[in-house]
Image (cartoon, grey):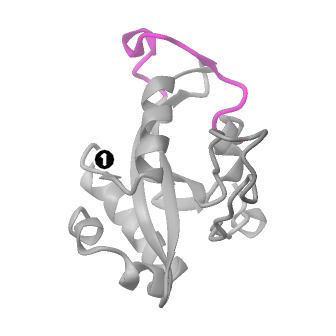
Amino acid sequence: MEKGKRKLEFNIIKNDPTDGHKGFGIGSLNLENITPLMVDPEEGEAWIEEQAMHARSKTERGVKYLKDRTELPEEGTKTFWVIWVAVDRKPEGPYYAGITACELLINRPARRGYKSMPEHVNHLDKAMKGHVIVHNMDEKSRNILSDFLKEYDEGMWERANEELKKEF
């Protein structure tokens, strides 16, 4: 993937989708403060991937997903991480409020892959609620992610809760 074509923006605006009225839209999720990232440990890079919000990132497209990861051939299978980053705002400015990681396995030669949709949905919800779940990542991937978050906006990293920073 070309680095120059990647969109590098976090969603940091958090609005009430109903503007205070009690009618249509009550109970709907507001995803304005969630940004999906992808981490490729093999290439040592991380990037913002807006299309991952709808499971339509370039990495995910063109692959048939299997329900059982053991059916995926080992040879040629590559691990990626889909990261859900929730950004919130303090009086001092925006900060990383919640971060969760989900494994994504892709075998391009076989055009097959594996991901657990319930895990992705649950982790998205947990990131929105301020949870930090990155212990399932290998150390190299966690380091790539933390380096990306720090380089993207050191202020958002500094304003993040200590619990979040300790996980890295």
Quarter holding the C terminus is: bottom left
Task: Kindly identify which residue carries mark 1.
Answer: 137
Q: Type of residue at label 1?
A: Met
Q: Main secondary structure of the magenta part?
A: loop
Q: Position of residue 7 (x, y in %)?
A: 73, 65
**Residue visible at 39% across and 21% down in the picture:** 74
Name the one closer to the observer, 41 or 53. Answer: 53
Snapshot quadrant of residue 107: top right
Q: Position of residue 40 (x, y in %)?
A: 49, 50
**Residue visible at 24% across and 49% down in the picture:** 135
Q: Position of residue 81 (x, y in %)?
A: 46, 45
In the displayed structure, would residue 30 be above or below residue 2? above
**Is residue 127 shown to the viewer in this render?**
yes
User: Range of the magenta residues?
Assistant: 58-76
**Residue visible at 52% across and 12% down in the picture:** 66
Circle 1 residues within 10 Å: few <14, some 14–19, many ≥20: some
**Residue visible at 75% across and 69% down in the picture:** 4
Q: Residue furthest bottom?
A: 92
Snapshot quadrant of residue 111: top right
